[in-house]
Amino acid sequence: MSGICFIISAPSGSGKSTLVNELRKFVANLEFSVSYTTRQPRGSEQDGQEYHFISREAFEGMIMHDEFLEWALVFGNYYGTARRIIEEAEHRGHDVLLDIDVQGASQVKERLQGAVSIFILPPSRAELESRLQKRSMSEHVPADEIRRRLDAARREIANYPNYDYILVNERIEPSVDKLVAIVESERARRSGKDLSARDKEYLETSEKCLKSRMERQIRSILDSFDVSTPTALPTREVTGR
């Protein structure tokens, strides 16, 4: 692949969708990969925007024909990224942004050399629970579903060492700035051209988000989720999208 594949993962309720939408406003030639799913649309979701909503039979047919770069069975529903989306972006000379879970990210990293992975963390477990509760009021999510998502979040967060960058989403504006810096610095670094003054600013900002630089800063967040040491990737039935 000639372009760069950027992978973003985060526990449900971390603000990932908002960050991705804002990132796309500021960065040109970055195509968002709309995943396929067999679950029903929620709230104001529309086919072809948040997801491609298809039947279980259609999804399993795509699996049989090896049409997915990665796919998952999550809480009883299929989710997947079609290979053609990556191929079409490459043909246009664009980079691509994948919004996928930790298992999908692992699959993509294995199959696409040079893919850049970013994990978004909430400031704490308490903050994530508060965000999920607020969302439940509009989406009518039952209390047991919130508990399940919090449990899934802890398992997902334990996989943070598998990512290149860690971003703590406390406030939208600075988080968007960091995301932009990560994308633009990776582009500049791989262009082979001399870095401009702005490129150097992006590089300085992005390097602060490198996983190796974030270990101490995120310790309290990991402790709030009772995550002490890295664990194996969770099974697909207990992760969330």
Image (spheres, helix red, strand yellow):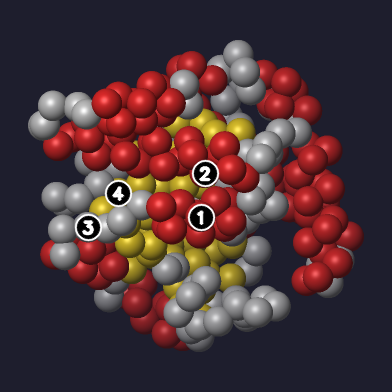
CA separation in Å, label 2 and label 4: 18 Å
Specify which label sits upstream in the sequence, 2 or 4. Answer: 4
Q: Quadrant of residue 224?
A: top right
Whole-percent x and y of residue 90?
Answer: 18, 60
Residue shown at 48%/16% (left/top)?
213
The amino acid type, in three-letter code, at marker 1 is Glu
Q: Do residues under tags 1 and 2 come within 8 Å of each other at their CB atoms?
A: yes
Question: Compared with residue 30, is residue 219 higher up or lower down, i.e. above or below?
Answer: above
* Residue of label 2: 176
Out of 2 and 40, give the one closest to the viewer.
2
Q: Name the disc covering residue 5, or none.
A: 4
Task: Tell me which label, 2 or 3, sits earlier in the chain.
Answer: 3
Horizontal side, residue 240 vs residue 30: left or right: right
Considering only order in the chain, which callout, 1 or 4, is on the residue closer to the N terminus? 4
As drawn, the label of residue 94 is 3
Instruction: Quote the CA–CA distance across marks 4 and 1.
Output: 18 Å
Q: For residue 32, which numbered disc appears in the image? A: none
**Where does residue 4 sit, x and y in percent of width and height?**
25, 47
Amino acid, disc 2: Val
Q: Sequence-wise, which precedes: disc 1 or disc 3?
A: 1
Which numbered marker is on residue 22? Answer: 1
Q: Residue furthest top?
A: 216
- Amino acid residing under circle 4: Cys
